[in-house]
Image: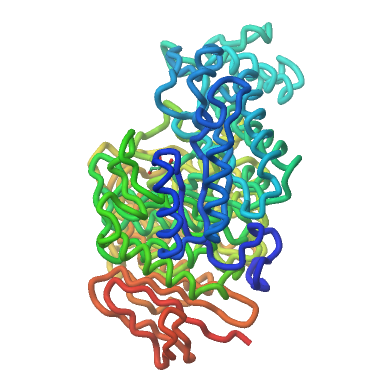
Amino acid sequence: MAENSRFVPGPQYDGWLTGVEQISYGGDYNPEQWPEEVWAQDVRLMNEAGVNLVSLGIFSWALLEPREGEFDFAWLDRVIELLHEGGVRILLATPTAAPPAWLYAAHPDARVVDRTGTPMGPGGRGLMAPTAPAYRSAALRITTELAKRYGTHPAVAGWHVHNEYGAPVALDYSVNAQRAFRTWLRERYDSLDSLNAAWGTAFWGQHYADWEHVQVPAAAPEAVNPAQQLDFARFSDAALLACFVAERDAVREHSTAPVTTNFMAASCPATDLFAWGKEVDIVSNDHYLQAADPRGYVGLALAADLTRSVAGGKPWLLLEHSTSAVNWQPRNVAKRPGELARNSFSHLGRGADAIMFFQWRASRSGAEKFHSAMLPHAGTGSRVWREVTELGANLGRLTELSGSRVHADVAMLWDYESFWAQDLEFRPSQGARHRERVDTYYDRLWRDGHTVDLVRPSQDLSGYKLVVAPASYLLTADDAANLTAYVEAGGTLVVSYFSGIVDQNDAVHPGGFMAPLRDALGVWVEEFLPLRENDSLTVAYGAGAAAAGAARLGTTELTGTVWADDLVLAGAEPVGTYADGPKPGGAAITRHRHGAGTGWYVSTSLDVEALAPVMADVYAGAGLAPSGIVEGLETVRRTGEAADYTVAINHTDAAVKLPMDTSATDLLTGDTVSGGADIPAGAVRVLRTTNR
Ligand code: GLA
């Protein structure tokens, strides 16, 4: 079992926000956008809504340091005192995601430069070049001043460093980046010969004879060397992380309150959050629904599971989501009644001990005035306000959940380096999108009621009954050996197409495609056979298809798109066979007994429906019992010292029944529930059962 499955909950558990004993509730608070007389009303309304935590000062640099080296903290002192008197605790921000105009004016060379060489000006927000000494020293100065002034203030529960590293831009091609990239490369490669070998510069005559000739991969007439681009992605991530670490350390000089920064798990691939997760004191995340997707709550669940995984299973802070519509998508669909609660409880069920929003009060001016808020333009007479206060009251009933943990039997591989590499140019098919496969397999697991951890291919997998690898294009030999050992020891592994292809330098593994997984899967790929756009093929799936070319009687026909392989069997049995397509009669889906475990390979793109029979067989083989819940009812369990808490969210338009073996207490109503729990259409219940 994963080591995080049990945890002793209780007030103020170790490593959590200073002085916080309950589920936190609140949002970004930007009082500088309002006249001072509004602030007292804000605090009064926060109390009314059950708000107990705000993120403060995220974009306040220009007001806190109006001229270089001149500080004005008087207004922030007053806001902090008001919040403190009102019992609202503070995540104090370092405002370095919105550098002031004077910094741009004084140091134009510290601007971020895009791939085409265009520098990014002020007037919006975002990082300046993370490697620019002028930006770094100015950011550290304001951070240090804030930490000195407020580091021991009793209202400060923690520090919110910067805002969403990696957004809106993650890659900087400036002269500062150029200099730092060479330094980074010299540390990674002991000699230019090693760099030439790693980058495969013999191809297209790219050999380097002088470090000074090595460039950032700016726009070029043809695709730039993929290994160079992959290293640039690694370097750019490291440059952002160095900014965070420097600010965090400056804060720590003057404060013992925990330091976090808000991630964008699942929507910002530029930062390797497994590395970042080790540097923050508490993991935080921001999540916004994709309004175009009516089932966006599945993507939400993935983001929340990823955040918990990055946190190593510990509780985390949801620092931002929206009460209703955002303002930056093509069509900003308002949340339906109850959706705000359903979204919030899904995060909570998946391990969040803080439910926060962007933002407290809707802005009258600026780029985000049409973004929803806790206190909308319509005021306190509105539906959103009513739902906000109801949620605050409900979270107030859940203090005993704080610190409890989520256990997952299923893991899915999530590897940033693999994603960076697969996103580069010249791949066999533009239709093969890593995120699409991850989302589709995750959706299948979600519909089947399995809670999922997202894991790196290098980590200990022994606690999981099933590991799914939907998109592992880059897989080092060591990582493949780890997966193979997992199967050997009794695990079940499912691998999707275009996996195990290249090493850490984007070089094809010797021995044929997927060679490093050959032992685990009993199959390798002689040739990729991607399909034309809109073409599809048929897979005859089932026991009847076990012998290649067998009659299709007794099998299920599954439709595949995007991809097929010419597979070479090396011990695996084909359980699905191509009935047509580029290789009729060839193996399409294989199963292989290796050691005490089983390796499955799925060589085409099955949609979420077509995956159902395959995954049902996978679960049965892995010893995963069917969840027995209605599709559309989301359930997640948090485990505390003496009780389990089942968070049940009904996403359907009809009442559903959650089967339960024992009686339970509904923590939101206080009712005792027995013989299963009725969950009305669109409703949420939090059910406590004793686990002793
Ligand atoms: C991001 C930012 C916020 C705000 C929201 C709007 O998450 O961190 O400042 O811009 O988006 O959705």
Residue 590 higher or lower than 479, as above or below = below
Picture coordinates of residue 68 (x, y %)? 59, 20
The foreground one among 457 and 157 is 157
Q: Indicate the quadrant of ligand 1 in the picture.
A: top left
Residue closer to the observer: 237 or 110: 110
Q: Residue at x 50, y 24 (%)?
A: 100
Rendered-image quadrant of the N terminus: bottom right
**Residue 563 higher or lower than 308, as above or below:** above
Residue 615: x %, y % from top left: 42, 65
Name the image quarter holding residue 642. Answer: bottom right
Q: Which residue is at 65% across, 47% downward? A: 259
Residue 333 point in image, percent of width and height: 24, 50
Q: Is residue 407 visible to the viewer in this orientation of the structure?
A: no
Question: Colour scheme in the image?
Answer: rainbow
**Residue drawn where x is 43% and y is 71% of the image:** 393
Q: How many marks?
A: 0
**Residue 231 location (% of width, % of height):** 59, 26
Examine the rendered structure and indicate whether residue 277 appears above or below residue 615.
above
Q: Could you tell me which quadrant the C terminus lies in?
A: bottom right
Q: Nearer the viewer, residue 399 or 471?
A: 399
Q: Quadrant of residue 609?
A: bottom left
Displayed quadrant of residue 405: bottom right
